[in-house]
Amino acid sequence: MPAPRHFAESPESVGIDPAKLEAVFERAAREVREGLLPSAQVAVARHGRIAGMRSFGSVTHEGSQAPATNDTLYVIYSCTKAITSTAAWMLIQEGKLGLDERVADVIPGFGTNGKDVVRVEHLFTHTAGFPYATMPPGTWRDRESRLARFARWSLSFEPGSRMEYHPTSSMWVMAEIIERRSGVPYHDFIPARIAEPLGLDDLHVGLPPSKHGRLADVVHVGEVLSPEELARLGFPVDPQNEVTEQALEAFNHAFVREAGLPGGGGTTTAGDLALFYQALLRDLEPHDGPRLWHAEVVADAILKRTGELLDPTLGKPANRALGMVVAGDENRTFLGFGHTNSPRSFGHTGAGGQVAWADPETGISFVYLTNGCDRHPVRQNRRGVSLSSRAAACLLEA
């Protein structure tokens, strides 16, 4: 659980309306109370402090049932991409990495099969051209095997010509770039440069064995939908999609928890992740205190870079920044944001219903986590929109 110094004295002390905050908590509790989800954890933060954090339901820790508490850790899946990306932002601000650099110039041997034209920016924006490239578990802890895998990957489309979500591949490349340009192993960089300076003891990409007893086991909920039912809902089954139920529930095994997958292996609490986004909001503005990111670097990193490219799954503007998704226009509800988020809001969702974002216009950051991966995509998305809409409107009126 975040240290006491991370909590506000009261919601009002950081400009959050306590009644509106309770509405967020009530919405998060509803489906747990109704028996659809086993547990949920939610946090709203502002001015660098947690205005409120609650946990609901019960979880299983390595086979033992326990109530969900604010100490419970959750797998955040692709919310991890924001953390890995902001690690790379540090190298950009230090002049150690350029967005226009060819990846093959950073990682010799990468530029095979036409990948010599892939640039660093493509990795952030899911325009790199190899969305279906995979990294088998046997390579996760073997650097030479990962490099050999890079060399075998080929392109599905010309880099930069379209946006297609890369579930894990581009962030494996980013992790290797971080290691090469910083001289620090990727798994050491995030704790040393981000989590520890921010005092976020429970922000991990690669869970220490000592904390496995606090991580909620992953389960799937709801009825299995047929391919035809999913297609009618606008979610056609992609046979090449690596984000399967088996892959998500693999996080119930120690090997996967500890591997620290850079594109989807983060584990944390809602409070620590909300505070991570508070640090980004803090450093987006000029201030005299210590900072991790330069204001101009954060401002540049959260600008939409994919132009008019559409997300092929949603048929809506992709709105991709440097490892983040930007809310943008009225289509923001398709991207993990609520109706009341400002267009400048940025963040990243995760498989199974995880939501995390920050809104520069209000200073609010919001995180919702659950260990119940909902098989019904429309219900899952509506839940995220409903929660985000309430959270984004939590400001205390003057």
Image (cartoon, grey):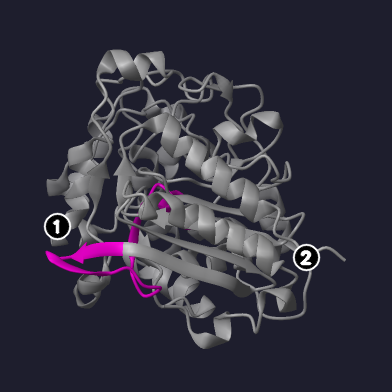
**Nearer-the-camera pick, 249 or 17:** 17
**Nearer-the-camera pick, 4 or 263:** 4
Q: Is residue 319 left or right of residue 115?
A: right
Q: Which label belongs to residue 380?
A: none
**Nearer-the-camera pick, 192 or 341:** 341
Q: Residue 336: image x %, image y %?
A: 54, 40
Give the amino acid type for the residue marked by disc 2 in the picture: Leu
Give the amino acid type for the residue marked by disc 1 in the picture: His
Residue range of the region highlighted in magenta in the rendering: 58-84
Q: Which residue is mark 2?
A: 396
Q: How far apart, in angstroms, are the residues tagged by discs 1 and 2?
A: 43 Å
Task: Tell me what residue is drawn at x 30 percent, y 20 percent.
Answer: 237
Q: Secondary structure at mark 1?
A: loop
Where residue 63 sits, quadrant-wise, is bottom left
Quadrant of the rendering where the N terminus is positioned: bottom left
Task: Tell me what residue is drawn at x 58 percent, y 52 percent.
Answer: 357
- Residue 368 vs 182, above or below: the answer is above
Task: Please check the rendered image and state whether residue 76 is part of the magenta-colored stretch, yes or no.
Answer: yes
Task: Tell me what residue is drawn at x 36 percent, y 37 percent.
Answer: 167
Q: Residue 212: image x %, image y %?
A: 21, 70
**Nearer-the-camera pick, 327 or 23:** 23
Q: Residue 135: image x %, image y %?
A: 23, 40
Q: Which residue is mark 1?
A: 253
